[in-house]
Image (cartoon, helix red, strand yellow):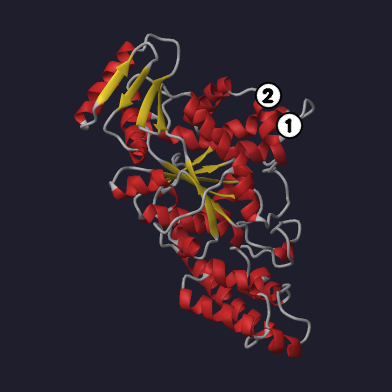
């Protein structure tokens, strides 16, 4: 079982993929986080690929917890959001001020200040274009959707997914529903209607992804299924299926699909379809269904990123300040942290030269791999370490220089970025 509230660092990603049905990424996306397999898995990313290929609208959604500082480990998600935005995504970011109030006692006013000064201003400085950023406490559409979604969720399910017990707080019961609503409500009619939606997460958040995908499916009337002979559509619910079937057949025919109707079994068989048509048909029917079902959602897709290792090993944690580099850190302080980081190097220079280091377990090498887009440069650093030509001291100094430059550039942009905040907030009042 994966616990999204745990501080545990996950390393056996292949086992996690196998155990939880996470699929491999393909070669469609050329961002270095994909090509270096730092994004190691996905769920239903083919929906996003289909939307991009066919120039269709799609969403990219993430959230932030307004407590503490934004650090390099958080940056990876925003790198993905900017990449998907460059491919045409409508970007939405939720500020989890309800959760921070409930779990950490952070007032809404303080959460707003933290979100703007520690996170959003850095997003803008990094290059995120105008998008929709909202605070949970102010978004009635999200709150209403969460209330409705809770009707399709029960304690037995939450116990199975999260390991909740009878003694678990109502907060832990509510939190996954709120997160599901953060992602799903962007498909309501006023936000553009049903559309493929990508959610970049660490593997520790997969339980949330599985729940929201299940919830999206439960509210659908049209259930599109791959079968050996092609695609079939089944009508959910107990209402008379005739009108739903007839309307579906009409729109499918306009898209040149041949259909075989079975009212008794509440089904439509699409005789000239192939299994690869399932995404197209699902999107077509979702956009038909929205006219008579306000809760029509296309199940969200997800990318899963390897969690960047803390500079002291293990997971980055604000409880171990030297394990992470905040984007608001003074560059000199960041340099100090990097120069005191653990490495994958040998104990002596002689051993390093003879046997080489191990960049695959080195937090310092991850500073290159996660935060430098130059593939040739990063490959050279890897090979020099592995071959014994690169020493840990000089490697740390080089990494420190790179990160210091990034932080200095970010700092120089912050004042200008602060003047643009209202271009991003759904509630424009600072």
Q: Nearer the viewer, residue 407 or 344?
A: 344
- Report the residue marked by disc 1: 164
Establish if 195 lies above or below 336: above
The image position of residue 407, as x and y in percent, is 55, 70
The image position of residue 403, as x and y in percent, is 57, 73
Q: Nearer the viewer, residue 101 or 204?
A: 204
Residue at x-position 45% and y-position 39%: 427
Q: Nearer the viewer, residue 347 or 429?
A: 347
Are circles 1 and 2 on residues that touch, CB within 8 Å? yes
Q: Nearer the viewer, residue 18 or 223?
A: 18
Q: Say which element carries label 1.
A: loop
Report how far apart the C-alphas of labels 1 and 2 lie in the structure: 8 Å
- Report the residue marked by disc 2: 155
Establish if 189 lies above or below 127: above
Residue at x-position 39% and y-position 51%: 130
Q: Is residue 243 left or right of residue 38?
A: left
């Amino acid at each position: 079982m994966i616990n999204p509230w745990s501080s545990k660092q996950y390393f056996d990603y292949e086992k996690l993929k196998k155990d939880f049905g996470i699929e491999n990424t393909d070669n469609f996306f050329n961002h270095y986080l994909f090509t270096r397999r730092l994004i190691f898995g996905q769920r239903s990313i083919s929906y996003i690929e289909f939307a991009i290929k066919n120039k269709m609208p799609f969403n990219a959604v993430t959230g932030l917890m307004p407590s503490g500082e934004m650090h390099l480990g958080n940056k990876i998600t925003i790198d993905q959001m900017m990449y998907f935005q460059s491919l045409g995504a409508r970007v939405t970011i939720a500020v989890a001020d309800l959760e921070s109030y409930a779990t950490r006692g952070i007032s809404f006013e303080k959460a707003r200040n933290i979100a703007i000064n520690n996170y959003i201003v850095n997003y803008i400085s990094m290059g995120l274009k105008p998008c929709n950023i909202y605070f949970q406490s102010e978004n009635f559409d999200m709150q209403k959707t969460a209330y409705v979604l809770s009707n399709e969720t029960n304690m037995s399910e939450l116990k199975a997914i999260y390991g909740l017990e009878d003694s678990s707080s109502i907060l832990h019961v509510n939190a996954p529903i709120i997160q599901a609503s953060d992602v799903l409500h962007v498909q309501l009619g006023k936000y553009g209607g049903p559309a493929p939606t990508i959610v970049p997460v660490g593997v520790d958040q997969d339980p949330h992804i599985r729940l929201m995908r299940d919830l999206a499916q439960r509210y659908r009337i049209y259930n599109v299924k791959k079968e050996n002979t092609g695609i079939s559509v089944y009508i959910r619910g107990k209402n008379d299926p005739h009108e739903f079937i007839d309307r579906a057949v009409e729109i499918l025919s306009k898209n040149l699909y041949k259909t075989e109707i079975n009212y008794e079994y509440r089904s439509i068989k699409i005789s000239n379809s192939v299994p690869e048509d399932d995404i197209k048909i699902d999107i077509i029917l979702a956009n038909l269904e929205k006219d008579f079902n306000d809760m029509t959602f296309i199940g969200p897709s997800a990318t899963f990123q390897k969690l960047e290792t803390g500079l002291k090993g293990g997971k980055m944690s604000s409880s171990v300040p030297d394990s992470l580099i905040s984007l608001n850190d003074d560059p000199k302080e960041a340099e100090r942290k990097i120069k005191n980081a653990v490495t994958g190097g040998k104990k002596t220079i002689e051993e390093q030269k003879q046997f080489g280091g191990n960049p695959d377990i080195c937090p310092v090498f991850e500073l290159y791999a996660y935060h430098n887009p130059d593939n040739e440069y990063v490959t050279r650093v890897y090979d020099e370490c592995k071959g014994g030509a690169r020493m840990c001291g000089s490697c740390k100094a080089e990494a420190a220089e790179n990160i210091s430059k990034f932080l200095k550039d970010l700092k120089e942009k912050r004042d200008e970025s602060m003047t643009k905040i209202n271009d991003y907030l759904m509630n424009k009042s600072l």
